[in-house]
Amino acid sequence: MSRTSRARSVASDSGVSSLRVLAVSPGPVRTEFFDVVGSQDAAVGRMATPEQVVTATRRALERDRTPPSIVVGMGNRLSATASTPAPRRLALTVAGRALKA
């Protein structure tokens, strides 16, 4: 079961309470991790700043109806959306093109 599926399940189970569930998929984030590694080659796609991740998370939580999950960054969203219902080969092709842009 994926992280998103678990978040949806927990959100559904807690429907009558005031508990809100949010799974955040930020993609690569510009942190000291890449300084320690000594390269940004481990990052797939454009890197977000910590501030962008926090802003996207706060916006999601401030909505009247908080979604069970968010994907931060347009490239990450395209990649995640393309890979969900599509065959693996097609998803990899679309993600590869999006990351080159």
Image (tube, rainbow, N blue to C red):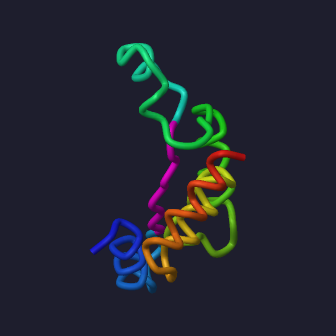
Q: Magenta includes 21?
A: yes
In the displayed image of the protein, which residue is found farthest to the left?
1
Please provide the residue range marked out in magenta: 20-28
Is the stretch drawn in magenta largely helix, strand or loop?
Answer: loop
Residue at point 42%, 77% (across, down): 8
Question: What is the total number of numbered labels drawn onto the structure image?
Answer: 0
Q: Nearer the viewer, residue 37 or 65?
A: 37
Q: Position of residue 79 (x, y in %)?
A: 57, 61
Q: Magenta includes 27?
A: yes
90 vs 101, left or right, is left
Q: Position of residue 38 (x, y in %)?
A: 40, 14
72 vs 2, left or right, is right
Image quarter of residue 71: bottom right
Residue at point 66%, 45% (across, down): 100
Can you say whether 41 is above or below 32 in the image? below
Can you say whether 90 is above or below 24 in the image? below
Residue at point 36%, 14% (across, down): 36
Q: Nearer the viewer, residue 54 or 95?
A: 95
Quarter of the rendering occupied by the N terminus? bottom left
Q: Position of residue 13 (x, y in %)?
A: 35, 84
Can you say whether 56 is above or below 28 in the image? below
Residue at point 33%, 73% (across, down): 6
Q: Position of residue 84 (x, y in %)?
A: 48, 76
Can you say whether 17 is above or below 91 in the image? below
Q: Nearer the viewer, residue 21 or 53?
A: 53
